[in-house]
Amino acid sequence: MKRIILAAALSITIAPVFGQIAPVYSNDFMDIGVGARALGMANSVTASVNDVTAGYWNPAGLTGVPGNIEISLMHDDFFAGIGAYDYAALAARIDSVSNFGVTFLRFGVDNIPNTTQLIDANGNVNYNNITSFSVADYAFLFSYARKFGIPGLSLGANVKVIHSIVGSFASSWGFGFDVGGQYQYKDWQFGAVGRDVTSTFNAWSYTLDQATEQIFQETGNIIPTNGLEITLPRLLLGAGRNFHFFKNKVSLLAEVDADLTFDGLRNTLITSNTVSVDPHCGFEVGYRNIVFLRMGLGNIQQTTDPTGQPVTTFQPDFGVGLKIKSFYLDYTLTNLGGAAVAPYSNIFSLKFDIYRKEKK
């Protein structure tokens, strides 16, 4: 029953959303994150990511994919199963110095009742007029990465295609670019990513029939017109170091990242009218490159307690990982919504490598 009520509320309130343009917070689903390993480290992998998930986090990291082909999958439910978030990616080796990747993301709410025709022309309630529709965001990332002449340096780029649908009422297409780099010096790792470097533009178009337009007018809703959403650029920086103990049986990776946005004041640890800085850090302890324990600290904010005194809050994340030959299973306990009132989620992700047999 709760699902039906919330879905009905979404169908009622979706009309006024059509007409809004939010250049700061458009394409928010692109900020959720992928891979239980990275999520367990509070997304602090800009410098160290070296697998298929690099197509999302930092395309330059695709040069570290160990096999000829690597595949990763993840699924998570939002709002007690009302919303679904899906991720799939593939990375493949082109030659000894370059790789490419393809990443797919979907965030959607399905089976939303369309109650706009619930009351017929005679003023009667007719439940047979209720249909259903989906609201979903899709993203396709096409990545390329290459090692360059400087030892330890890799550069990469993404071409992003974003498609959003609101049933048969509205749809949009958007395009954008990311660029990234990584540099490794001994046990040190450094990374930088420019997301939406040219800004990502989503062009919306609407197709409302006359009956729906009339209902919107009668209920005081805005009649939407074609418009444009803009996702502004941001800069991600990261630095990490690897440590080895007990004759390399135990490893420790520690990384500190900072997300820089330039769209005005945000509730981050460091804020100004010019730039807002959101720092976060992650740690990964491995034993014989088989079992891994992870922890991250992120979403650090300045808030006030019930007495009005300033306090600093943060979000802890925890995770574990298991590697068996070419198969990886990762788990993390995290709050994907990032809100203090939102519950934690149990996230699992799979990854496996495919090695081609060398011709004799």
Image: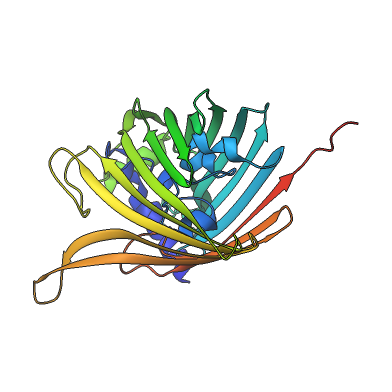
Residue 111 image offset from top left, x and y in percent: 53, 55
Residue 219 image offset from top left, x and y in percent: 28, 49
Residue 63 image offset from top left, x and y in percent: 58, 35
**Which is more toward the observer, 318 or 139?**
318
Residue at the farthest front position: 247
Is residue 228 depicted above or below 318 in this figure? above
Instruction: Please report the residue visible at 25 percent of the width from the left and 66 percent of the height from the top.
Output: 313
**Which is more toward the observer, 59 or 131?**
59
Is residue 282 depicted above or below 142 in this figure? below
Is residue 246 depicted above or below 139 in this figure? below
Scheme of colours in the image: rainbow
Residue 25 image offset from top left, x and y in percent: 30, 43
Residue at the farthest left position: 308
Task: Kindly tell me whether residue 106 is visible in this rendering.
Answer: yes
Using residue 217 as the reference point, say whether residue 351 is left or right of it.
Answer: right
Instruction: Please report the residue visible at 31 percent of the width from the left and 58 percent of the height from the top.
Output: 299
Residue at the farthest top position: 149
Using residue 304 as the reference point, say whether residue 231 is left or right of it.
Answer: right
Task: Kindly tell me whether residue 139 is visible in this rendering.
Answer: no
